[in-house]
Each structure stands twice: as structure tokens, then as C-alpha cells.
Image: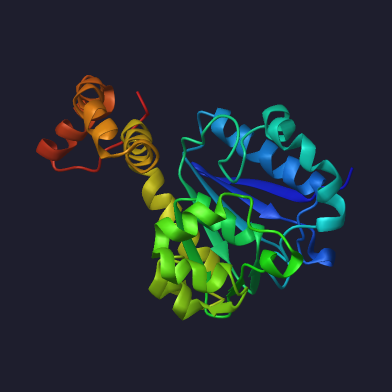
Amino acid sequence: MSNFITEETEGFVRKIGLNRPEKRNAMNIALIEQLSGALGRAEADENIRVCVLFAHGTVFTAGLDLMDVFPRLGDAQTLFSAAGIDPWATHGPARTKPLIIAVHGKCLTLGIELMLAADITVASEDATFEQIEIDRGIFPFGGGTARWVRTMGWGNAMQYLLTGDALDVREAHRLGLVQRVVSREALMETAMGLAARIASKPPLAIKATIESARTAVLEGERAAAAKLLPAIQQLATTEDVQEALSAHFERRPATFRGR
């Protein structure tokens, strides 16, 4: 089987690369399964605190490889449970570690939905985005319909979901689809620098922050509020909190171990 995903580790950060450049990183079943497996391995590795997803080649992704994936749509419910973590967070166990997306060039369909399912997106100035499922007689089925609306509001979302029109990176940033815009040359340095900064923070607090925010989004603010005090009480007993306090009073950088 071809290796459509690359994996590298730098400190506490796992770099995961889309690696099907000859097909403009179009996502076939093999690539999807390998990406799911890579995220699952990062999730299970106690030495990994943050993931950065990028792409090899001239574009981020041409999106879904329709001819390869459509015959397997009936397997969607079980596709990720066997391989690892669903990159689009629509099936199976939820990812608990931060995921940063570094986008360059064209980013179509499932690529945009990857961004919406991640935590932070850094994009290069040459990035463009197109959610063109409507032109194929379908609609975004990687969580996009809900997340476009949640991210930028109904009218802004429908303007692009119903037309398939392209967004340049400035408009994507204005609408909240992208969090940082940098030069192409600075893309990976920026994404990795952000990842390293997050990785230096207490891992248990990072996990709790994501879980609390996700609960608020998926279940509502009342559900999240009901879990606030128990979560804080649990964190207060951790070694990382004691280290943070000691480092503060001793005026030194803290070293967190996720305990």
C-alpha cells in the first residue's frame, strides 16, 4: 500500500502530512484511513501533546476522490472505528489533543471540513477555499453544513454552501474560517511555533479546556456549566497545578508533565 500520510515528531508535536501530491492530495479511502490511523496513534502516544496537519505538494487538497469513495459510503459508520480517530469528528471517539491545520494553495471540500473540525487553522497568502459539493449534486457530509453555520452565521454560510463560490484567504479570515494568514514561506514555521507554544502548557488543562468548549458547542452552555466545578476540582489536585504555583512563586519557567 502507498504511504499517503507522513508522520514526524518534533518534541511534543506530531507533524502529519497529506502525501498524495500527484493527485493533488485528493482524499481516497486509503488516504482517509491512513490519516485516521495517524491521528489515532498521536492520540494514544503520551509523548504527543499537539498535532499539526499539513500537505506535501503545490496544493493542500483537491478534496474528496469521488470515484474511489462513493462506492464505500455505506461503510462510513465503521470506517474510522477500525482505523483510529475520525479526522472530521462525525463518527467514533473524539480527539482530545489540539489539532492545528496549515493550509496552502487550493483547499476543496473535505479539506475545508478538516479545518472546521480542527482547533486552529493557519493559512498562507496563496490559499483559496471552495466547498463545491453542490456542483456534484451532493452536500458537505464531513460536518460542514453545521460547522459553516456555527462558524460564520447562516447567511454567510449559505452564500458559499449553495453556490460553491471560492473564498480567498482574506475573506476566509474575516469569516473565521482561518485564524492566521502568513506568507507561504512562513506557514510551517508559524504553525509549528504555535503548536510548540501550546505543547508547553499543562496537557491536562489543555484537554479540559477543549472538552469544556466542545461540551458547550454540542450540548449547550448549561451542560458545560454543570461540568465546570467538578473539572476544576479534579485539575486542582494535579501535579501540574502544583508545578505552576511553584514556578510562579520561584519566578522560573514551569515544566509540565501531564500528571
> Is residue 21 something that shows in the picture?
yes
Residue at image position (16%, 31%) is: 246
Location of the N terminus (image quadrant): top right
Q: Which of the colour schemes (rainbow, by chain, secondary structure, one colour) is used?
A: rainbow
Q: At which x and y percent is residue 199?
A: 41, 44
Relative depth, front residue between 55 and 210: 210
Q: Quadrant of residue 165?
A: bottom right
Q: Position of residue 97 (x, y in %)?
A: 47, 38
How many circles with numbers are drawn on the protein? 0
Q: Is residue 6 above or below residue 178?
A: above
- Residue 203 picture quarter: top left
Q: Is residue 235 above or below residue 176?
A: above
Q: Quadrant of the C terminus?
A: top left
Residue at figure coordinates x 31%, y 34% from the top left: 205
- Residue 123 in percent (x, y) is at 51, 69
Report the front residue among 236 and 149.
149
**Position of residue 216 in the picture relative to residue 8 (left or right):** left
Observer-nearest of 196 and 61: 61
Can you see residue 60?
no
Q: Give the residue at the far left of this rendering.
A: 249
The residue positioned 83% from the left and 64% from the top of the image is 23
Q: Is residue 2 left or right of residue 8?
A: right
Q: Nearer the viewer, residue 80 or 201?
A: 80
The picture places residue 248, in percent across and down from the top left corner, at 14, 39
Looking at the image, which residue is at 32% across and 40% down? 216
